[in-house]
Image (spheres, rainbow, N blue to C red):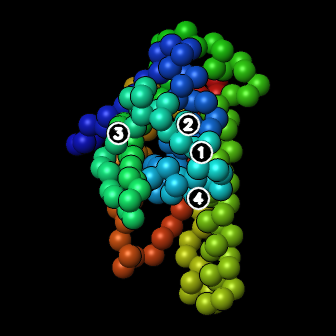
Amino acid sequence: MDKKFKTFLAKTDEEVKMIFDPLRSKIISTIAYMKEEMTVKQIATEMDLPANKIHYHVKKLYDFGALDLVRTENINGIIAKYYNLKYDIYAVDNKADNSNMFTNQNNPLLGLMDDAARKFKNGVIANMELAAKHGKEARGTALVEVSKLYMTREEEKALVHEIYEIIQKYSVKDNSKEVYSIVSAIVRIK
């Protein structure tokens, strides 16, 4: 565990609502998934939503301090603002009283899981199309695993950190390498 990851822990209902609003959490996960600074237009295109709707929420996240304005660029007289994540990890503090977060039918964590599952499913579909076009040597390995893990909270935190480090190691964009997709979630069930 060499690297210390910058983590935002939502401790109040206001912080939870700000970061884990379904659309805002998708903006955060889109920037994280793309692994690069993005303009509002790029985020909107990736999410297939109107730019003005995304602009409103990006501004809210920026004003709140969840996003950084990395740079601006003049493109044909229009100032493009490039945003990136301010934190490596956005999470809910398990010590805080955020009972609304866990009882709400529109739970933003479930929205994040749906979004992650959709992106992963799209990756699986892309893999099948690749294999259909180029044959079995293009398939790669597919691992889908759901397991119960038994550990202490300290072990859970260490495992999350380890998994995050491994994912970060392979998340640096390199056009000379093949592209894979992973979805990961660790949740306490008992």
Q: Quadrant of residue 142?
A: bottom right
Q: Residue drawn 66% across and 20% down? A: 102
Q: Amino acid at mark 4?
A: Thr
Q: Amino acid at mark 1?
A: Asn
Count of labels shown? 4
Q: Quadrant of residue 17?
A: top right
Q: Residue drawn 51% across and 57% down? A: 42
Image quadrant in which the C terminus is located? top right
Name the residue beneath numbered marker 1. 52
Circle 3/circle 1 CB separation < 8 Å: no
| Residue 181 in sight from this viewpoint | yes
Q: Residue drawn 38% across and 76% down? A: 175
Other residues around mark 3 within 10 Å, as few (<14) / some (14–19) / many (≥20): some
* Front of the two marks 3 and 2: 2
Circle 1/circle 2 CB separation < 8 Å: yes
Which badge, 1 or 4, comes first in the chain's sequence? 4
Which badge, 3 or 1, comes first in the chain's sequence? 1
Name the residue beneath numbered marker 4. 45
Disc number for residue 8: none
Seen in the picture, residue 181 relative to 132 is either above or below; the reply is: above
Disc number for residue 68: 3
Mark 2, secondary structure of its residue: helix
